[in-house]
Image (tube, grey):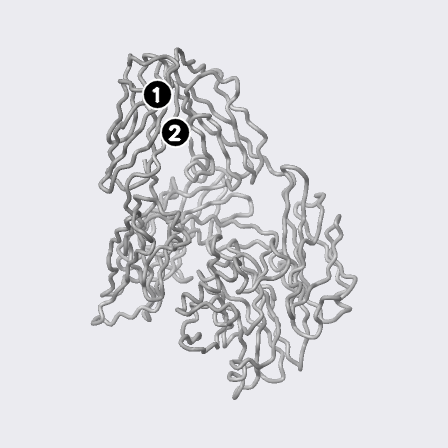
Amino acid sequence: MKSKLLSTFSMLRIMMVAALTVFCVSCDKTETTDSTGFILYYLGITDIGPSMSYTLKAPAYKGSTPYDFTITKVTLNEESFSNNDNFVINTETGEITIQNTDAMASGLYSISVGCYSNGKFFDFKDAVQVNMLLAVPEGVTVEPAEVLVKMEDENWWETSAQVTTDAEKHVSITKYEFAEDESKEYLKYFTISNTGVITFNPDYKDKIIPGEKYVLSLKLTTKAGEHLYPDAVTFNVISKPLKLLYKPNAVRVEQNTAHESQLPTIQGSEGMTYAIKSVTPEAIGFTIDETTGKISLAENSPLEINQVYKIDVTVTNEYGSTDFVEAYTVTIVDFISPIQPETFQYIIPDTYEERAYEIHVSPDFKGDEVIFSFINNTGIIQEQIDKHKITIDNTSGTISIMADNTLTPGNYEINVKATGPTEDKGEATTTINLEIKVNPNKFTFYYGNNIDLTPADKFANQYSISNEKELLALSLSPTIQPAGQTIKWKIIAKKGENVKNLSTPPAKIDENTGRIYFETVDGMIMNTLNIGMVVVEATCGSGDLAYTKTTPVFFRVAETASGVFVDYKPFVFQVNSKTGGTSASPTITSPTNIIYMDYRREFNFFPINMVEQGETPKSEGSQIKYAWAYSWEQMGGDFNGGARKPISYYDENKPIINKEHTDKLLAFIDPTTKAIKVNEEMWKASENGYVNGVFIARMIYSTDEANGLKTMIDGGGKQFFPIAIWLDENF
């Protein structure tokens, strides 16, 4: 049957949020971890509206089975909230029901959950977050509410819908977005303009499935706040039948024996009817279920041994018919071996965390024309199956474990069934006892800092020097966990090389110890406040279990010019590129107040594990160019990779006045606090969701209250590089 995408608004986004990086331990706002290793994973709601009810499914977990669930605390916008049966938890399963929402105030609700595991109580702060929005403003509609998309039409992906308002209601919408729901992976297949035009994203048109209905909810921003418009528009993609597939599509059948195929998969609009167009050579006995497409062969049909029968199938719906040539093939044989249950076993390889594996049926297995399937699996194994992290080939029985599985070290059971082609050929079940082992080479490391920030692992890998002597005196040894590993070290890139006015730290590294040191200052720009970086690669072990980690290490020249020093602490701002955030405000040393400060030019982006030289918003195919273009699009302007508008607060080039819509900027300097504000949902990357890398750009400042702003806008003012923004969607 056709693939079924999750299209109801009640489906919830997965928040797998225990992200440990080599630079620091960091995550998004709903991390649910505990130092003992027990972890609870809830599905998380982002945008919902009043009068809606949802049940949050039972959480996944790592460790012993949890029990005795309880809600320990609920907050609204970080203030205590009296939970009057708005959030109810099932004490046995951990399911959370959200109900009685009619009178709930809008805002961000954070739910803390407690449970027992292996006799110990765990309390997970802000395990689930619910963003309660206002109802859609009166007078807002989408025309048409259901968009009929005919895939046979030329340029079908240009089909669109328009958000409209009733002018008499005076509804003013300042921002159009899709409501967040990461269970709807297809949201990225669509775009919405700053005027409310909804259409397909042409970059993803090949992902659109014929016959699917894509339901989109909208988040609309007005001066009164954010509003939810659930199920605002449906894109109904219609087509004639496409891509009929039986698996297996070639079988052997014992002479005079009845046979049934597996149900096929097919794409296209609903209302399919199936018919056999022809059988080659001609034969009687074959029929097809016109509703399901299952092909049957009647018992005692007059078919010859060793003859191959090729079946053409015609499938029809209201939009047309399609002939599928040789959709199914049947070879008649004189005997098919029955299953011998005692031979049904798997050859289990050594399996380690964070690796891909195939588990094969033993070559001693006896039985022909067998169909293999999972049966009666539970817990995290069933979860991995549902997420296609563990799959089975129904004809060979081979089980594939994907590299991005989330199985942690421990013992697991996978239950499999083998079924013969007919009842008399038997069936058998077996249990695979799978042990996921700790990778003996897995490790983490970090370098500290010399700017008095603790803990060292959180504020790691950043060193400030004021002169050549301090640089040459640096001798930086990594902290390695667990200790005692044999590791090979190297510097794989010197970021900033050939980039104007950024330092290229001439760092060297001891390949056996990881100690970083300097023998020269060549490449360091010592006469201005600026930042340079290198990337350290460390590898433990060899072969399939070799484990490699990379991390940047930053060096700042803390130069005071004309008595002015802008000290961001930390000077490497780590931030989630999806959710955004705000840096610490700098300590400013200056004879007079710095009145204005803004990003100006030399916008450099450094993918951690890619090119040695920085990229710019003009670099074709780069993450930063895509993000830059996305910001321009949201502002309603034409892309300009050399202009500062996506990163500037004070840019007033018409028709777009930046300070009037700062939410459409990638980032900006707060004019009051001088902190860096990185906006959520703006740092988009073309293929990888959100950018991952380091952004360093030149800033400009002025202490002239009367004329400084005009001077800066005109390109004057004093300039420096005081802070690096490290963006990663796992922070």
Where residue 210 sits in the image (x, y, percent)?
Answer: 32, 44
Q: Please tell me which residue lies in front, 53 or 685.
A: 685
The image quarter containing residue 368 is: top left
What residue is disc 2 on? 247
Q: Nearer the viewer, residue 538 or 56?
A: 538
Q: Is residue 74 above or below residue 173?
A: above
**Relative side of 584 to 10, left or right:** right
Q: Which residue is mark 1?
A: 309
Considering only vertical position in the picture, is 243 above or below 101?
A: above
Tell which of 29 and 471 is nearer to you.
471
Compared to 372, does 606 lie above or below?
Answer: below
Q: Quadrant of the N terminus?
A: top left
Is 3 situated left or right of 383 in this image?
left
Q: CA distance from mark 2 to mark 1?
A: 17 Å
Tags 2 and 1 touching, CB below 8 Å: no
Q: Name the disc covering residue 224, or none.
A: none
Could you say where residue 674 lies in the image, as x and y percent from the top left? 53, 74
Residue positioned 57% across, 81% down in the render: 716
Q: Nearer the viewer, mark 2 or mark 1?
A: 1
Residue type, numbered disc 2: Lys
